[in-house]
Amino acid sequence: MSGKKRDFSDPHQMMTVVCVVFYSGLGLLFLDWGLLTLFPPLGETPVPLVLLACAMAAILAASILSAFVRCPFCGAWLCRGMRLPWRLPRYCSKCGEPI
């Protein structure tokens, strides 16, 4: 070890969690849209609103969880601008350490 203390969790695991939550929310959104398209009478029930609320909550949770994807060495935020990248950068933009 180089003597640096790792205070932060593994960013790869956290990024996996963020992507799973985010894309689950998108899946719920498409499911809601598909159900309303195929079964218009379903629009008179609370089911579409519940699915929409769950989808929005999952997408919001993924955005909040992205704040915890940080460099394990210096703690720099790796998801700038609340974007969800497909993969993490190879090196931290702040300290230059490999991630």
Image (cartoon, helix red, strand yellow):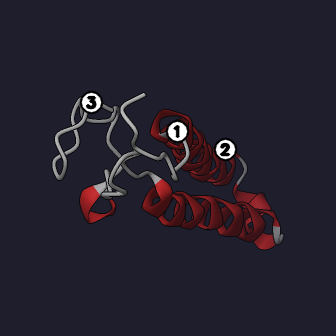
- Give the residue number, with chain letter if any, for mark 3: 98
Q: Where the C terminus falls, by quadrant?
A: top left
Residue 85 circle label: none
- Give the residue number, with chain letter if any, for mark 2: 38
Observer-side mark, 2 or 1, equals: 1
Distance between the alpha carbons at the discs numbered 1 and 3: 12 Å
Please state which amino acid type lies under the numbered disc 2: Leu
**Residue 20 falls in which quadrant of the image?**
top right
Please state which amino acid type lies under the numbered disc 3: Pro
Please tell me which residue is depicted at 51% across the width and 51% down the height of the picture: 8
Number of residues whose C-alpha sits closer than 10 Å to that of mark 2, classed few (under 14), some (14–19) or many (20 or more): few
- How far across and down, in percent of the image, does residue 48 sit? 72, 63
Nearer the N terminus, badge 2 or badge 3? 2
Number of residues whose C-alpha sits closer than 10 Å to that of mark 3, classed few (under 14), some (14–19) or many (20 or more): few
Observer-side mark, 2 or 3, equals: 3
- How far across and down, in percent of the image, does residue 21 sit? 61, 47
Residue 10 circle label: 1
Nearer the N terminus, badge 1 or badge 3? 1
Say whether residue 57 is left or right of residue 78.
right
Please tell me which residue is depicted at 60% across the width and 51% down the height of the picture: 25
Front in this rendered view, residue 87 or 93: 93
Distance between the alpha carbons at the discs numbered 2 and 1: 42 Å
Residues at circles 2 and 1 in contact by the CB criterion of under 8 Å: no
Q: Find the residue positioned furthest to the front.
A: 3
Nearer the N terminus, badge 2 or badge 1? 1
Q: Secondary structure at mark 1?
A: loop
- How far across and down, in percent of the image, does residue 98 sit? 27, 30
